[in-house]
Image (spheres, grey):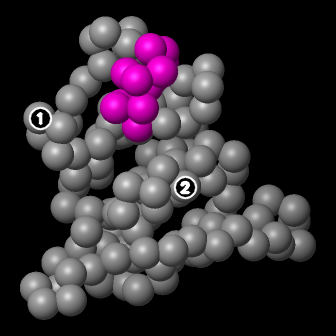
Amino acid sequence: MTDPIADYLTRLRNALKARHRVLDIPASNIKKEITKVLHEKGYILNYKFEDTKNHQGNIKIALKYNTETKKPAILHLERASKPGLRKYVHANTMPRVLNGLGVAIVSTSKGVVTDKEARDMNVGGEVLCYVY
């Protein structure tokens, strides 16, 4: 697999379209950090990291839906930086998603954070994806 983050986002997107409640994804450190950010920002209900026999592990994600309209909390997931074209930004040129209503997940030297947190810490990095 050449792009595990794109695979993670595609699995998440497909599970949301199929209205699944729980999703299993093979784990990696960057996927765990993206999952933590999504949980902190309220896009997913809960998550759990599990070990498997091959020591890679799994991430179990409980997806979040609106109780009345049954719409998912994540309406759009888009990969920004790809293996063929990386997208790096400085702190002062950090992108704003939907004028601040969405979130850009950024991999910085201080860890995987949102665009707002990166701006507050005054660090730049690689823009992984946009979520809203």
Mark pair 1, 2: CA separation:
23 Å
Label 2 CA crowd tier, 10 Å (few <14, some 14–19, many 20+): some
Identify which residue, 109 or 29, lies in the foreground: 109
Asked whether the beta carbons under mark 1 and mark 2 sit within 8 Å of each other, the answer is no
**Residue 41, image x and y in percent?**
38, 55
Horizontally, residue 18 falls left or right of residue 114, namely: left
Residue named by callout 1: 99
Q: Who's the residue at 31% across and 9% down the image?
A: 92
Say above or below: 32 vs 122.
below
The quadrant in which residue 54 appears is bottom right
| SS at circle 1 | helix
Q: Judge left or right: residue 71 versus residue 33.
A: left
Is the residue 70 above or below the residue 116 in the image? Answer: below
User: Split into 4 quadrants, where in the image is the N terminus?
Assistant: top right
Q: Where residue 71 sits in the image (x, y, percent)?
A: 17, 78
Q: Which amino acid, by three-letter code, is at mark 1?
A: Asn
Q: Which amino acid, mark 2?
A: Lys
Foreground pick, 108 / 126: 108
Magenta region: 114-128
Q: Position of residue 51 (x, y in %)?
A: 82, 70
- Left or right: 106 in relation to 112: left
> Quadrant of the rendered structure where residue 44 is?
bottom left
Residue 126 position within the rendered picture, expressed as x and y whole percent measured from the top left: 46, 22
Does residue 17 appear in this view?
no
Where disc 2 sits, the SS reads: helix
Mark on residue 36?
A: 2
Q: Residue at x 65, y 62 (%)?
A: 26
Residue at horizontal 80%, vertical 59%?
56
Image quadrant in which you'd find residue 18: bottom left
